[in-house]
DNA sequence: GGAACTTGTCGGCCTTTCCGACAAGCTGT
DNA sequence: ACAGCTTGTCGGAAAGGCCGACAAGTTCC
């Protein structure tokens, strides 16, 4: 029932809220404890009936059997549903360091994207949307700035294939980019509120435009208690099990690629080690962060 | 490229603007003269180069090879495109009079429909649509008339599968049925103007609602000159040819079922014969017409 | 031919949303 | 710290569209 979403759109849609993107045949670690935190009602492993003997296993090594990258029908949010087969973990396989992190297969499809957290004004007031200048200039077709008030109509496709039209105008004093006509309909249609994020994406040479949504926070991110307990039981029994995960800022990831775990071990990272890393911000800028590795 | 439309919706959509609906294997008469009238620029058969020797043939008997019932992408209008194979006409086949007009195969799918020519107010003023009482009562789900101002939201699918939502309210003094919210968007979306017709249809036990459009008149009804001449040439040469026809009030039908022609002959109708016939009006009412058969 | 009913049009008014003014906040120097 | 740029919020104004009043047109007796 949920809409299947192509990989590149799915990635841009979740942004950096999801560090690991599942692929078929990948080896991963499943963290039951993390999973149980996302249950809609608390799971007390000790008192489950019949007992969940998984309690002592902090992680379960699995291979991914099937991957579905999807968009939620109600909220438009990108999420994944995967099938996992528990299998023995035989320790890290030695690879020459040059081959340790194979570069992702080069995408033949160009994609640029820009996300913005909706302000009060964007979400309700007046019915318009302030487009960050960088977004307008890097994603949308160029306006004719010779005109008095340059404007164009944008056709943007959402994750379900529905096309939305927006009037993009450059006006006011000082001049700024705005979405006017059509924006209000989008906001009500998608039930967007103040702190939700909207992601505009430009794909390929035809420069087709897409739009994704990251919700501020929602009850929906919790999975049914039965679903979670069921997955834990099956995982422990060694049976194939299914997991649904909504990537979201601040939501624990309980499926982690083996590579990532092993890299931590290999690099001998430990609390206190100084790190410097490039972080992609919500608004697409990159910043450097200096700090200490904590856990 | 145009959308394919199921038979029952197609029928309701054209209403009585099309007396003959093509079916594969049907025997029909093709009237080149009628076809040429619908060319975008006049066809002078005498001066066509190379010559169109079809001039003397007033009708060409054909069998239908292929039928496509379609909806125009731009205007939503129902039209058909058929493939015809010219074949010799061997005269009427004798049938016992009881079998002369076989009843159409009983449809397992119920369909009711109601059409209305848009008034000035419907098409522009105020943004609402006056629903004829009979339309509201026979097609739309029953309102709760105990309420002060009964209202409901209708989901209606157009010929391309797009769903439109309309607020249906029963208000005013005297009370009347109206479409308000959503109607204006439909009018602009479909570029409807004053004399266009809108057809609401209810299908099957689930009472799904559909909407079709009959345009008031449009240049588009004329076919390309080359297309028409080409069909005429091929027909005369006995080759399979293609014909596109937009049924419209007052547009000559140049494909006529053999049955219809033969019935005229059989009944010995001639100019001056008195007739009395049931005519289905645009607004779905039936009236009796007394008059004289003219041609 | 008259009463009852149906529905097209209109002006009023409420809601939506488009607009520039202004200023807060950020960036880069 | 300051100048210049970007963009969030606001009140005014225009447009869109919902409303009942009214009356023209129709149907049914």
Image (cartoon, coloured by chain):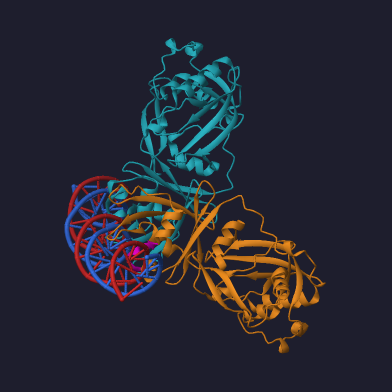
Chain colours: A orange, B cyan, C blue, D red
The magenta-colored residue range is A124-131
Residue B121 percent location from the top left of the image:
28, 49
Q: Height in image: B254 above or below B49?
A: below
Is residue B26 rendered to the left or right of residue C18? right
Q: How many labels, in total?
A: 0
Magenta segment includes A126: yes
Rendered position, A180 above or below B106: below
Considering depth in this image, is B150 or A286 the residue closer to the camera?
A286
Q: Residue B272 appears in which quarter of the rendering?
A: top left
Name, please, the residue furthest toward the bottom: A47
Residue A134 picture location, percent across and down: 42, 59
The answer to whether residue A179 shows anywhere in this view is: no
Q: Is residue B220 left or right of residue A28?
A: left
Residue found at x 59% / y 47% = B108
Q: Position of residue B235 (x, y in %)?
A: 55, 19
B144 left or right of C11?
right
Quadrant of the image for the C terminus of chain A? bottom right
């Amino acid at each position: 029932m949920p809409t299947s979403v192509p990989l590149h759109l799915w990635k841009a849609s979740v942004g950096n809220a999801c560090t690991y993107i599942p692929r078929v045949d990948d080896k991963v670690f499943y963290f039951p404890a993390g999973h149980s935190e996302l249950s809609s009602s608390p799971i007390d492993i000790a008192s489950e009936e019949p007992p969940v003997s998984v309690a002592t296993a902090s992680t379960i090594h699995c291979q991914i059997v099937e991957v579905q990258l999807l968009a939620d029908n109600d909220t438009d949010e990108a999420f994944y549903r995967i099938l996992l087969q528990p299998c023995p973990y035989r320790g890290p396989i030695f690879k020459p360091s040059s081959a340790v992190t194979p570069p992702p297969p080069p995408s033949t499809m160009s994609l640029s994207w820009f996300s913005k957290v909706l302000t009060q004004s964007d979400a309700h007031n007046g019915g318009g949307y302030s487009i960050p200048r960088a977004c307008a200039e890097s994603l949308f077709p160029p306006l004719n700035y010779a005109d008095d008030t340059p404007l164009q109509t944008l056709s943007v496709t959402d994750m379900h294939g529905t096309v939305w039209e927006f009037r993009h105008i450059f006006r006011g004093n000082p001049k700024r980019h705005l979405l006017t006509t059509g924006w209000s309909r989008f906001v009500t249609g998608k039930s967007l509120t103040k702190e939700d994020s909207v992601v505009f994406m430009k794909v390929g040479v035809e420069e087709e435009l897409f739009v994704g949504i990251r919700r501020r926070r929602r009850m929906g991110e919790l999975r049914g208690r039965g679903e979670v307990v069921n997955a834990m039981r099956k995982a422990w029994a060694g049976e194939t099990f299914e997991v649904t995960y909504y990537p979201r800022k601040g939501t624990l990831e309980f499926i982690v690629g083996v590579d990532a775990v092993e890299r931590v071990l290999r690099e001998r990272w430990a609390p206190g080690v100084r790190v410097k890393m490039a972080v992609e911000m919500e608004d697409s800028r990159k910043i450097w962060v200096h700090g200490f590795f904590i856990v």
